[in-house]
Image (cartoon, rainbow, N blue to C red):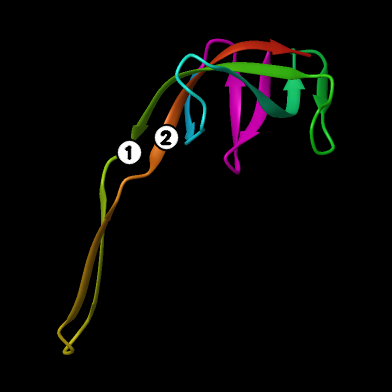
Amino acid sequence: MFAVVQTGGKQYNVTLNDIVRVEKLENAVGDKIKLDVLLVSDGEKTVAGTPTVKSAEVVAEVLAHGKGDKIVVFKYKPKKNERKKQGHRQPWTEIKIVSIKM
């Protein structure tokens, strides 16, 4: 059984016991959260939502929070002595899929 869920403006194809890094969520570690289900399938029957499947439920547990690797953004204009250096680390939340119900 698998489901397509949406969180943080992105869609993820998940199955039971998957560990997924998603955009940062404001939940504490150990919290259980319900995700928006866009599609769910058990191998024989597939149900697609418009936009979500009301009867389906995907529950996930928050495992950890963190930040991704640093990327360096360097902008400059040639011959003008104009330089700007920035760094960015994207925050993430790691979740584990606990249950998928159709």
Question: Toward the viewer: 83 or 65?
Answer: 65
Secondary structure at badge 2 equals strand
The residue singled out by tag 1 in the image is: 68
Number of other residues with Cα within 10 Å of mark 2, as a class: few under 14, some 14 to 19, many 20 or more? some
Residue type (three-letter) at the residue carrying disc 2: Trp
Tell me if label 1 and label 2 are in contact, CB under 8 Å.
yes
- Residue 52 position, x and y percent, is 79, 33
Side of 65 where 22 appears, left or right = right
Mark 1 or mark 2, earlier in chain: 1
- Give the residue drawn at x 85%, y 37%: 50
Side of 37 where 59 appears, left or right = left
Q: Is residue 89 above or below residue 35?
A: below
Side of 6 where 70 appears, left or right = left
Q: Residue furthest bottom?
A: 79
Q: On the rendered image, what quadrant is the C terminus found in?
A: top right
Q: Which residues are magenta?
A: 1-18
